[in-house]
Image: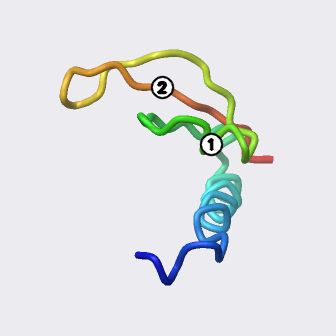
């Protein structure tokens, strides 16, 4: 929604998920997406290509929680 853009909500959610995962003892988080360039700017590393639910190729990202 347009009124929520520019408030850095996405980056806050990413940081929150990393903190919560670290509290639970996880050292890394993984995600897959077809977005280009978004997660890289928050330090997520592209670690390969996987198949999505639709069968299409999508990127796999990972980041340390600590």
Q: CA distance from mark 2 to mark 1?
A: 10 Å
Q: Which residue is mark 2?
A: 59
The residue positioned 64% from the left and 44% from the top of the image is 26
Neighbor class of circle 2 (other Cα within 10 Å; few <14, some 14-19, many 20+) is some
Taking 24 as reference, is 56 above or below it? above
- The location of residue 9, given as percent across then percent down, is 60, 71
Query: Foreground residue, 60 or 2?
Result: 2
Disc 1 packing (10 Å; few <14; some 14–19; many ≥20)? some
The residue furthest left is: 54
> Which sits earlier in the primary sequence, circle 2 or circle 1?
1
Q: Is 52 left or right of 35, judged from the image as shown?
A: left
* Residue drawn at x 57%, y 31% as measured from the top left: 61
- Taking the image as shown, residue 55 lies to the left or right of residue 32, namely left
- In the displayed structure, does residue 4 sit left or right of residue 23? left
Label 1: which residue?
Answer: 39
- Identify which residue is drawn at 72% across, 44% down: 41
Q: Observer-nearest residue: 35 or 14?
A: 35
State which quadrant residue 20 falls in: bottom right
């Amino acid at each position: 929604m347009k009124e929520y853009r520019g408030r850095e909500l996405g980056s806050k959610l990413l940081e929150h998920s990393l903190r919560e995962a670290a509290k639970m003892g996880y050292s890394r988080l993984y995600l897959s997406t077809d977005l280009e360039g978004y997660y890289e700017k928050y330090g997520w590393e592209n670690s390969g290509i996987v198949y999505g639910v639709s069968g299409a190729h999508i990127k796999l990202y990972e980041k340390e929680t600590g």
